[in-house]
Amino acid sequence: MYDKETLEKKRRQARELYKKKALNKKEIAQRLGVSWNFVHKWTEDHVSEIIDQRGWPLGKKRSHTEQEEVRLIMIRRELEKSNFFYGAGKMIDEYQKRFPGDPQVNKSFVNRVISKNFPMSRRNTLKAVKEQKYPIRTISSLGDVQEEADFLGKKYIHGRTAPIHFITRVYKNPFTLRLIKRVPDQGSETILNTFTEDWKVYPLPDILSLDNGFGFTAAGRGRRYISGFIQSMLRLGVTPLFIAPKKPWMNGSVEGTHSVFARKVWNRFDFKNLEEIDETVARFQEAYRQYSKTPKALPGRTLDKDFNWQDVFRTPFQPQDGMCIYMIRLVQEYQKNQSQIPAIRLFKELVELDPQFINVYVLVKLDVYREHIFIYVEPDQDGQKLVVEKGLPLNFAKMRY
């Protein structure tokens, strides 16, 4: 005895084989493992439509009603009052809970209802960078688990003069997870404390995308210095990827999370103290996890529960084979010896490139072990092209934690 879903599948297959493959009914019955009577009924009944569990004919667009639109508007308004998130996915879930016997509403219809009844100001879209060869395909292939991290701008509350700092991290692949945490400052030691404690629970990333902020890159005034923070990441098997300076959109997942946090948390509540902030941020983070449907059990390597970076990282840093740093840079003209040269800046050094690459994004791979750089461009077709290869002697900052 077949269930309803299996019968519907066999019915579609029978019609396909009969009308398009021109098989006779006996052959169809043998192929599908059903009786001749079933095949006869399915192929001769041209009037009836096949209805699946959604409640409308297969192959036809879903016809929505005014009542469904009114219900969705009501659900949206109620969600806005009581929830951090109330997009189309959340509205569909809530609709099914309230009206379980009704056909499922289509996501495109829900989005039309939102656009019609809850208009928002159009956000500025990112400038297209196709002409500048932004290496998006190459970056996505660098590692399985990829994470972005950045600080949220300083915040203040009434009655407190000291700024409030938040660090935001977003896992992009192979799952979506957003972490926002209040921290005492933006120093390297605080970053290491935050990262290593979280990585005892959440997976260590293969690629950690960062901006060029002082807390991540600080290594004094010397040239070609690798900071203590970068050394720490390399020891953990985490490869840093530094986005181009003054291009925050390259960490778009973090920037988007900051925007959502500002709208749904910081600008929405009047906080009186740090306890209120921490409690609200925790609720927001859990709501974001549920909204993104992030599983609680995540794949990947984690740190041991007793790991203490201060015990491990105080030993002298020794580069190992395979340790690399990636950097995205935009080739620009720089002043050198009273002339303009096309180049990129790496660790306070200028690296000259061919003039054809002016205003083109390049991906730099720094082999820390061999002290060698490889500069790639990503052409229009798949793959990448090596355009510069040269040595880059490095210095390593002393750990001061």
Image: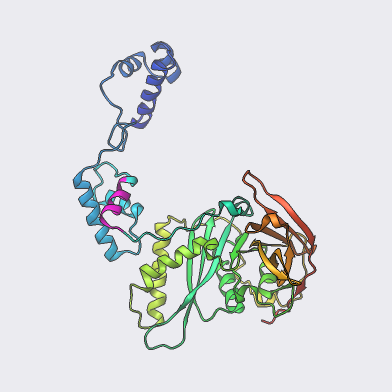
Region of the chain picked out in magenta, as a range: 109-119
The image shows residue 381, relative to residue 19, as above or below, that is below
Q: Residue at x 62, y 60 (%)?
A: 207
Q: Nearer the viewer, residue 7 or 390?
A: 390
Q: Quadrant of residue 357?
A: bottom right
Residue reaching furthest to the front: 338
Quarter of the picture containing the C terminus is: bottom right
Identity of the residue drawn at 63% across and 43% down: 381
Q: Residue at x 50, y 61 (%)?
A: 252
Residue 262: % across, % down: 40, 70
Let me know if residue 110 is in the magenta part. yes
Is 391 placed left or right of 301 in the picture?
Answer: right
In the picture shown, does residue 378 fall above or below 318? above
Q: Would you say residue 333 is visible in this rendering?
A: yes
Specify the color scheme.
rainbow
Q: Position of residue 350 (x, y in %)?
A: 73, 68
Q: Measured from the top left, where is residue 162 in percent x and y?
A: 46, 87
Asked whether residue 171 is drawn in magenta, I would say no
Q: Position of residue 143 (x, y in %)?
A: 63, 54
* Numbered label tally: 0
- Quadrant assignment, res 285: bottom left
